[in-house]
Image (cartoon, grey):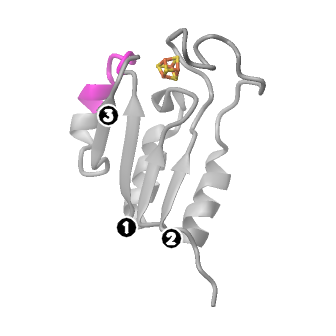
Amino acid sequence: MQSLPRNLWFEPTNTCNAKCPLCPTGSGQLSCSPACLDIGFYKRVIDEVQPRTVHFWNDGEPFLHPHIFEMFRYAADCGAVTYASTNGFVFYVCKVALKTSFMIRRLNVEPR
Ligand code: SF4
């Protein structure tokens, strides 16, 4: 019997617009190159796994990804509940998040 995960975590990008000293991204200590998650790969994973929840956070500011709202929309259209964590420094994020709140169940704003 095959079992797939119900909850997925994605790192839309490993770049950030903050420089928190205790964070590997903010302090420039990440060993990998700056990158953004490929939207085609993301959609293939969502299609295959059909997760119940999709979380966007890790070592970077998710709202810097150029297709982040498309990623929210795609997950929501597939029936997943979406969560994100942001430093809130992208000034329009809260405004846009309110307009798209039907796609985002919870938005953590946590500048460290
Ligand atoms: S806002 Fe978050 S990801 Fe960005 S530098 Fe600070 S802790 Fe790291």
Element type where label 3 sits in the image: strand
Q: Quadrant of residue 78?
A: bottom left
Query: Is disc 2's CB within 8 Å of ligand 1?
Result: no
Q: Quadrant of the N terminus?
A: bottom right
Q: Quadrant of the C terminus?
A: top left
Of mark 1 and mark 3, the one earlier in the sequence is 1
Element type where label 2 sits in the image: loop
Q: What residue is disc 2 on? A: 50
Q: What residue is disc 3 on? A: 108
Element type where label 1 sits in the image: loop
- The residue most toward the front is 22
Residue contact at pointers 2 and 3, CB within 8 angstroms: no
Q: Quadrant of residue 28?
A: top right
Residue contact at pointers 1 and 2, CB within 8 angstroms: yes
Q: What residue is disc 1 on? A: 79
Q: Position of residue 57 (x, y in %)?
A: 49, 38
Q: Residues under labels 1 and 2: Cα distance?
A: 8 Å
Above or below for 65 versus 49: above
Q: Residues under labels 2 and 3: Cα distance?
A: 24 Å
72 relative to 50 in the view: left or right: left
Tell us which disc is closer to us: 2 or 3.
3
At label 3, the amino acid type is Asn
Q: Residue at x 54, y 32 (%)?
A: 65
At label 2, the amino acid type is Gln
Q: Which mark is residue 9?
A: none
Tell whether position 92 is magenta.
yes
Magenta extent: 88-96
At label 1, the amino acid type is Gly
Q: Residue at x 62, y 10 (%)?
A: 27
